[in-house]
Image (cartoon, rainbow, N blue to C red):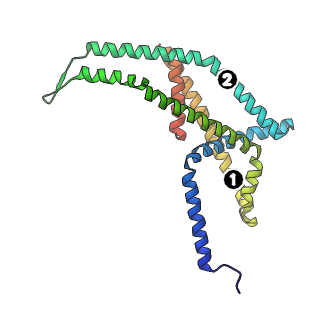
Amino acid sequence: MDAGWSRNTRTLALAAVFIFVIWATYLARSMIGPLVVAALLAYVLNPIITFINMRTHLPRSLVVTLFYLLSLAVLVALGIIFTPVIARQAQELTDELEAISMQIQTEMAPTTSVFGIEIPLRDIFADFVTAPEAFVQSDRIIQVVNTATTNIVWIAIILIVTFYLLLDWDKLREWMIRLAPPMYQPDVRRLYGRIKDIWQAYLRGQLVLMVVIGVLTGISLAIVGMPGAAALGLLTGILDAILSIGP
């Protein structure tokens, strides 16, 4: 009696495994984005952790923990320093926009005629200006709170996953390389090195570009006397990163 699987049985088993993987991926689709972000963060930070680990000879777990604590302290310090400035400038920008909108409503003609059709410009503009007031309604506030809570949870998940990826990145890399047949493992290792160098250079370049664009935008707007220069510079840098890397 043949103990091996027949061709039809193997085909059905592979199809069942494929369907299960697709089904599991669909169920966990909301986790894919945070996991990809965590993997990218670990990918970028791993050379820094490895360098510190080799220079200090401290345990890798201690290096990762100290790096996390130091990064958190720096972020908190930056938040304490820059949050009041950005909040004040954002309020100045809001006040300036409100003043401009009031001036436009005052000087705008009540209606205009396009191909014989009367368009109530002032009423349309007034509706446009007052539309943001709906944002502060109770249901919108609840929605914003829920969204913020969800984002905080995702950020926590990303940080936790990144932490453990940094702890075992070398082991994970070697495990993935050993999945290839032994004769192809040197080629896979070289390919990994080339991909690593390219992606790390790209991500570091995008980070530098984001900082440079944000700083130059803020300085340029401050020179011309634009209200909210720092807030607009920060927003410009963040939006540039989103456009370059993706939301």
Q: Which mark is residue 215?
A: none
User: For residue 210, which quarter of the picture?
Assistant: top right
Going by the numbered disc 2, the residue's amino acid type is Val
Measuring from the top left, give residue 186's x and y in whole percent. Answer: 75, 60
The residue depicted at 74 percent of the width and 29 percent of the height is 69
Going by the numbered disc 1, the residue's amino acid type is Tyr
User: For residue 166, which quarter of the picture?
Assistant: top right
In front of the other: 101 or 35: 35
Q: Is residue 131 above or below residue 164?
A: above
In front of the other: 47 or 134: 134
**Alpha carbon distance from label 1 to label 2:** 35 Å
Q: Secondary structure at mark 1?
A: helix
Q: Is residue 216 above or below residue 204?
A: above
Measuring from the top left, give residue 48's x and y in whole percent. Answer: 74, 37
Which callout, 1 or 2, points at the residue further toward the start of the chain? 2
Measuring from the top left, give residue 169's x and y in whole percent. Answer: 74, 47
Kindly identify which residue carries mark 1.
192
